[in-house]
Image (tube, coloured by chain):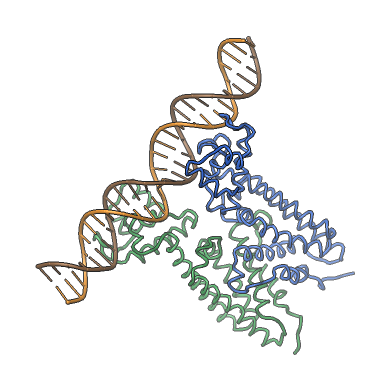
Chain colours: A blue, B green, C brown, D orange
Amino acid sequence: MNAADFLKSVKRGITTAMTKATAEPAPNKGAYHHGELREALVRATRQLVVERGAENFTLADACRLAGVTTAAPYRHFRDKQEILEELVARAFDEMSERSRVAVEAHGEGTIEGIRAMGHAYVQFAVDETAMFRLMFGQNPALKKAADVVARGQSCFANVINQVALYCQREGIQANAPEIAVDLWTFVHGAASLLIDEDYEKVAPGLDVQRLIENVTPRLLRVDEHREA
Amino acid sequence: MNAADFLKSVKRGITTAMTKATAEPAPNKGAYHHGELREALVRATRQLVVERGAENFTLADACRLAGVTTAAPYRHFRDKQEILEELVARAFDEMSERSRVAVEAHGEGTIEGIRAMGHAYVQFAVDETAMFRLMFGQNPALKKAADVVARGQSCFANVINQVALYCQREGIQANAPEIAVDLWTFVHGAASLLIDEDYEKVAPGLDVQRLIENVTPRLLRVDEHREA
DNA sequence: CTCCTAAGTAAGCGTCACTAACATATGTTA
DNA sequence: TAACATATGTTAGTGACGCTTACTTAGGAG
């Protein structure tokens, strides 16, 4: 059952046991205490953010999904913001994992591995658009949260690492962090313009995979500074 | 006087003639009808969006700045959204203008001119961060507004045009729209990561000007496909 | 001067984030 | 097992928001 549909029923007062159970299989049905409300709220928040975007997410809806009153979350989170922080931290972990898998599949320190990381970045933005926007959006408080910053840095360290390995293997004399910034910049631009549908207005049907395919070697400075 | 300070006074009920006049020099002071409320609201909206970000903008605040009740805007705009559309359309016009000036100063169809367009793009994002976010943010309704789309396309047409001129002058055999997309992607990524302070977490003190300086020739495929 | 219309106001609806005071489980300790 | 402390819910409320409805006023055309 769709969250949107469920919320409509709730607002109409139709909260049968069945629909409730479908939306939220609480371990403690009908009890005064939910049992695992914190996790349930994070799940509900994630579902709503994915379905309707972070902009349109309301804490009240998450409460309805979880089957508790609107005051209940404040036993587990400081405010609305803190639930989103939890979500973003988990999203960075998933992005790291995807990146790791991509490199592993194509070989450490290879240009193919680095390209695959780029594709993984864009694919993550496409698959998890709402999360991506939350991770790199304009919410300053959210992005300054300690564990969010740490996870972001660890993600980028991966890229530097692969570039350094590549340069070493290929005997290219270059500044790995600088190249990593170039790559990140391009790939981030591609992901942003793609999910915000800005390409559509101007270059409809653009193949972003090929875009990255073509540009990566340029940014990696292939055919330059070679020594071996 | 700061808009924030003025709004505080209003909420406290301190609306002396002086403070009111400072914030909004209405042509029709104290009158029942404002006289140019539409423009006044756009100005107030712009000021508030710049000061506090589009996320934190409320129509009610704009009304207080303009000195009217919260129902007044609906005589001039369909809803909150429509005021923002007006703002975004004007922002695209300014971006176009900056771009034009940058090219003119460095020469049509030159690599310097194209670089200057990139710098202008990033500089616009820095100077008018809130506007830039509104223009390329995730508000779908806003971005589909007819005049917003048209202005965006016209902006990008400029870039294609300059790249095509450059290729022609230099005798480079290449697909101008494709190269324009590459450039836009990179520059947009740089602007986004810069204003959202994502670079800071990972590469503090990064010089974005140099970043563009270095990458532009690569994306313009200098030293490739040359015929002359 | 009268009437029409454009452009304001006042009051109110439903929703939101968040708070304070109260109620009920749960688990520890005597 | 009883009593208490603490964790985790609820009820009821606050003030702000976007937006609507019904009323009021100003200004121009006939």
Image coordinates of residue A87 in percent, x first then y, are: 63, 46
The reply to whether residue B127 is in sight is: no
Q: Could you tell me residue B205's position as x and y percent?
A: 65, 59
Residue B4 in the image, given as x and y percentages of width and height: 41, 52
Q: Nearer the viewer, residue B113 or B181?
A: B181
**Image point 43% across, 64% down: which residue?**
B82
Q: Is residue A29 visible?
A: yes
Of residues A70 and A75, the one nearer the viewer is A70
Horizontal arrangement in the rendering, residue B24 relative to residue A204 (left or right): left
**Left or right of residue D26: residue A129:** right
Q: Please, is residue B188 above or below residue A77 in the view?
A: below
In the image, B202: left or right of D23? right
Q: Looking at the picture, how far across and down is residue A162, in whole percent?
A: 80, 58
Residue A37 or A122: which is nearer the viewer?
A: A37
Is B180 left, or right, of B12 in this rendering?
right
Above or below, A202 against A59 in this view is below
Question: Looking at the rendering, which quadrant does residue B182 occupy?
Answer: bottom right
**Residue at the spot x=71%, y=50% of the render?**
A94
**The C terminus of chain A sits in image quarter:** bottom right
Q: A16 and B124: which one is in front?
A: A16
Q: Total of numbered circles in the picture? A: 0
Residue furthest right in the image: A228
Residue at 66% x, 80% y is B176
